[in-house]
Image (spheres, rainbow, N blue to C red):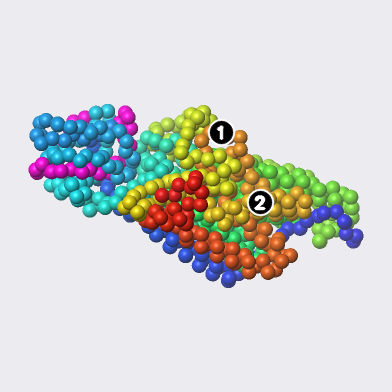
């Protein structure tokens, strides 16, 4: 039969997973797992607590002692202006000579009140609200712990008092909200953090359930999600690029991106939505690369179903999953109403023809019924299924807040009000706008600690310069390929990347560079595809890409201290890491 000159595509052949792929994934995962899990956080924290009330709790040191400071580990309530802890000092149990009012203190963290006074008796009271305190440390003039003989829960876990308060033994940044909520879910306490959907905090709760309410417990789930992003990125890139060596390169670029490391080791929810965004786009790409004329129709529905499933899980973690969903919709519409429709008209132009084994009459007869069935199927898996997942994720929320379905509805309006109005005029020292993210104008500074005047600790989240800055050039190249070469892979990657970014452009509320995290998987995929396209013209680029990967890993090693909280020389950071004045790293 006569073949048509019109464009009729066929399903892309899947590149098989080879022994090299399995070994590469295993080695990269093992190496990264060691780095990610090392020094993640203490696996023990004070558990028993004494509830401080209006009635004073008195501590007798036995004799008058010089007190430099008092460290206390708070439970599930934080201190603020309307919930204060009063620390009284005296040498007479019936008279308080001096009182310190502590109005700031983080949950599940060691907090410090500087004293620098002498006293025998310490009294604790909470005038406004009951405050669970899990452990107390009284430090003397030489910063040593003053032993206290007491049957109180305040002094029953003294072995857990840290020599140095840091992220290793306390919550930091937004962990004070999300780790706390995970604990509240487990103990059916009224939920404090309600500004995001519950699923991400349920994952945090699972880690706490397994390992306890300690830093390792509330961080392990996110870290494991970060580890399992690695094989997904590898398989995703292998499906697009068809080259194992390039998949390994791309996977290493993602593995050793700074934000991938820092953002998955903190107990916040961005890691979960990003994980599911990668999966929802992976399965949409599988559909995008299919043609329902040369593939059993039911088989084409499987990747759509999985894409919709992971989309639902992503949105149930954070509303930014909706941004990603818009990109899925665009890709789906392009697939059905651009590519398939063009093929339909191409077939009608030559109804007796055949292309690549596909009879044109089959296309003519199948297009409308298969399109209708596909759309109806998508209504189920991209609307009904995500809605069910989203509502199901609220079960712990409803149990904790003793509310029904009306509570879910109210929470949606509350979240919208909070993000759309409440924080509209808020400010933060380390906030940044969307156009500053790719160039890393303002990293977000999560944690800072001082070991000595010359040694400090810091945790910042931003990108690997060799990845993010090269990613800008890769994005421009992808736009060129999509617009002028009609490259469908480049088009897919541009849409996937922009879907995560474009919605932030009109937003004027407080934003941070970590909002760019869902873009990172597509940055490395765009770089990988750029290497592939150039490699076809310039084969020597393969060796250059290996050198480039080495530079990425070297930069990760250089910046590791300020990504992990490792004690580091202030001079080293100033000399080698502080590339711009806006970078605050320790």
Looking at the image, which residue is at 59% across and 63% down? 548
Residue 353 in view (yes/no) = yes
Where residue 475 is drawn, which disc sits there? 2
Q: Image check: 363 left or right of 219?
A: right
Q: Position of residue 247 (x, y in %)?
A: 61, 63
Which tag, 2 or 1, sits closer to the chain's start?
A: 2
What residue is disc 1 on?
A: 508
Quadrant that contains the N terminus: bottom right
Q: Label 2 crowding class (10 Å Cα cut-off): few <14, some 14-19, many 20+? A: many
Residue 567 placement: quadrant = bottom left
Looking at the image, which residue is at 59% across and 67% down? 546
Looking at the image, which residue is at 63% across and 57% down? 527
Residue 288 in view (yes/no) = no
All told, the count of numbered labels is 2
On whether residue 70 falls in the magenta region, the answer is yes
Where residue 85 is drawn, which disc sits there? none
Where 459 sits versus 427, above or below?
below
455 or 173, which lies in front? Answer: 455
On whether residue 377 falls in the magenta region, the answer is no
Magenta region: 54-83
Q: Where is residue 80 in the image (x, y as percent from the top left)?
A: 33, 32
At mark 2, the secondary structure is helix
The residue sitting at the bottom extreme is: 19
160 or 235, which lies in front? Answer: 160
Q: Where is residue 339 in the image (x, y as percent from the top left)?
A: 77, 49
Q: Label 1 crowding class (10 Å Cα cut-off): few <14, some 14-19, many 20+? A: few
Looking at the image, which residue is at 88% across and 59% down? 3
Q: Where is residue 337 in the image (x, y as percent from the top left)?
A: 76, 44
Q: Is the magenta stretch mostly helix, strand or loop?
A: strand
């Amino acid at each position: 039969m006569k073949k048509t000159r019109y464009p009729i595509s066929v399903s892309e052949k899947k590149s098989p997973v080879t022994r090299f792929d399995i070994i590469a994934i295993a080695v990269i995962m093992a190496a990264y797992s060691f780095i990610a899990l090392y020094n993640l956080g203490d696996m023990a924290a004070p558990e028993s607590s004494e509830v401080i009330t209006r009635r004073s709790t008195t501590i007798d040191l036995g004799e008058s002692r010089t007190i430099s400071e008092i460290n206390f580990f708070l439970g599930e309530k934080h201190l603020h202006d309307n919930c204060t802890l009063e620390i009284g000092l005296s040498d007479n149990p019936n008279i308080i000579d001096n009182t310190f009012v502590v109005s700031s203190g983080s949950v599940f963290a060691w907090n410090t009140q500087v004293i620098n006074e002498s006293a025998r008796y310490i009294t604790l009271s909470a005038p406004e609200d009951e405050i669970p305190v899990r452990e107390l440390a009284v430090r003397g003039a030489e910063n040593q712990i003053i032993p206290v003989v007491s049957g109180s829960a305040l002094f029953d876990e003294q072995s857990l008092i840290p020599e140095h308060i840091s992220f290793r033994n306390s919550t930091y940044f937004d962990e004070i909200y999300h780790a706390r909520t995970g604990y509240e879910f487990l103990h059916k306490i009224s939920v404090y953090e309600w500004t995001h959907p519950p699923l991400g905090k349920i994952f945090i709760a699972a880690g706490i359930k397994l390992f306890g309410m300690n830093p390792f417990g509330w961080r392990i789930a996110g870290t494991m999600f970060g580890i399992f992003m690695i094989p997904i990125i590898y398989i995703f890139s292998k499906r697009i690029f068809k080259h194992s060596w390039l998949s390994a390169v791309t996977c290493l670029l993602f593995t050793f991106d700074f934000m991938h490391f820092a953002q998955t080791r903190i107990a916040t929810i961005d890691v979960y939505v990003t994980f599911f965004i990668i999966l929802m786009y992976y399965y949409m790409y599988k559909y995008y690369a299919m043609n329902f004329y040369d593939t059993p129709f039911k088989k084409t529905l499987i990747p759509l179903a999985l894409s919709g499933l992971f989309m639902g899980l992503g949105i149930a973690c954070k509303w930014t999953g909706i941004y990603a969903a818009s990109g899925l919709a665009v890709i789906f519409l392009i697939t059905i109403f651009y590519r398939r429709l063009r093929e339909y008209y191409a077939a009608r132009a030559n109804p007796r023809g055949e292309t690549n084994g596909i009879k044109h009459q089959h296309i003519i007869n199948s297009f409308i019924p298969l399109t209708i069935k596909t759309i109806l199927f998508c209504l189920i898996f991209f609307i009904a299924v995500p809605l069910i997942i989203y509502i199901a994720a609220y079960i712990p929320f409803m149990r904790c807040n003793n509310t029904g379905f009306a509570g879910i509805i109210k929470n949606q309006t509350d979240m919208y009000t909070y993000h759309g109005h409440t924080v509209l005029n808020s400010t933060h020292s380390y906030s940044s706008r969307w156009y500053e993210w790719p160039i890393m104008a303002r990293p977000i500074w999560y944690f800072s600690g001082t070991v000595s005047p010359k040694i400090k600790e810091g945790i910042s989240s931003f990108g690997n310069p060799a990845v993010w800055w090269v990613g800008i050039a890769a994005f421009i190249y992808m736009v060129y390929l999509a617009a002028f070469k009609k490259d469908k892979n480049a088009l897919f990657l541009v849409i996937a990347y922009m879907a995560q970014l474009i919605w932030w452009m009109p937003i004027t509320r407080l934003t941070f560079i970590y909002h760019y995290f869902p873009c990172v998987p597509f940055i490395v995929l765009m770089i990988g595809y750029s290497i592939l396209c150039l490699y076809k013209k310039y084969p020597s680029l393969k060796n250059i890409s290996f050198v480039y990967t080495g530079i990425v890993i070297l930069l990760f090693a250089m910046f590791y201290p300020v990504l992990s909280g490792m004690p580091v020389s202030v001079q080293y950071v100033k000399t080698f890491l502080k590339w711009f004045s806006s970078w605050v790293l320790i």
